[in-house]
Structures are given as C-alpha cells and as structure tokens.
Amino acid sequence: MATILIIDDDSDIVTAIRMTLEHAGHSVKDAPNGKAGIKALKATPIDLIILDVMMDTPTEGFELAKELHNPDPASKYAQFNKIPILMLTAVQSKTPLLGEIDMDYLPVELYVDKPIDPDDLLTKVEWMLSRETV
C-alpha cells in the first residue's frame, strides 16, 4: 500500500485519519507543521500528502502547497512536486470571509472541508493514489 504523510497540528484529526488509513493498509507518517512536514518528506518516500491550512500561521498549508508544487525545476523542493496533495481543512468554516477557493490558484489535486466521513476520506485517498501522475 501507500505511504501517506499527514501535515496537521490537530492531534485528534491526525489520530482519526491515521486509524482510517492504517486500517486500509496504508503506512502513515505525520507532522504538526510545514517545517516538520518537509523534514518527513526528506526522510521517507511519500506517495500522498494530506495537508491542513491553518497551523503555525493561518495560511501555512497554502504556502507549503505552493512551495511543494512549484513547477520550476530549480525550486528547492522540485523532487516533491509530483506528490499529490489532498488539502483537508476547516479554513472555510473558521474564516468565511475567504469566499470561494480558487482551485486554479491552489496547487493541490483535491480540496476537502473538515470534517470528513472516514469512508469518504478513504475513497478520495484511493482515487488520488490511483491517478496517473504527469
């Protein structure tokens, strides 16, 4: 199965996602913020990232996604830009003034609001893992 990195500062969410994914046979790593997430990416080959938005800063997840999926081959994280990102966040419910998320701007493959049903999460993860990378 896949190795999935959860980057989220909410330990309860991490535990719930971990239980769902491990029950399905996946290996799970976690990090509480972007800096620790980069460290985990460098330490272990990762097949999929599940990323929160609001961690150490209100937009940390957005910024990390932009860095990781920077198309410039000279970017410092170019080796990670093909790893799919599922952004799982409650940012819309906590900051409704953001309005509609512009998926053309956001460099993630899938954006999902928290909370998410475990079966729905697993379906989305399996779909993302089965997609062909460009």
Image (spheres, rainbow, N blue to C red):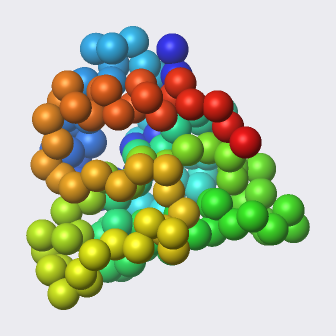
From the top left corner, tell me how far across and down residue 19 is, in percent.
24, 25
From the top left corner, tell me how far across and down residue 74 is, in percent.
87, 67
Q: Nearer the viewer, residue 36 or 125?
A: 125
Q: Nearer the viewer, residue 41 or 71?
A: 71
From the top left corner, tell me how far across and down residue 93 is, in percent.
12, 70
Q: At 23% across and 70% down in the image, what residue appears?
A: 91
Q: Residue 133: name its quadrant.
A: top right
Q: How many marks can you see?
A: 0
* Residue 37 seen by the camera: yes
Q: Is 73 left or right of 1, judged from the image as shown?
A: right
Q: Quadrant of the C terminus?
A: top right
From the top left corner, tell me how far across and down residue 35 is, in percent.
53, 63
Relative to 131, does residue 83 appear above or below in the rendering? below
| Residue farthest along the right direction in this orientation | 74
Relative to 69, does residue 50 appear above or below in the rendering? above
Q: Is 86 left or right of 130, judged from the image as shown?
A: left
Q: Nearer the viewer, residue 12 or 99?
A: 99
Q: Is 108 left or right of 39, judged from the image as shown?
A: left
Q: At 19% across and 71% down in the image, what residue appears?
A: 92
Q: At 17% across and 42% down in the image, what residue appears?
A: 116
Q: Nearer the viewer, residue 9 or 71?
A: 71
* Residue 4 seen by the camera: no
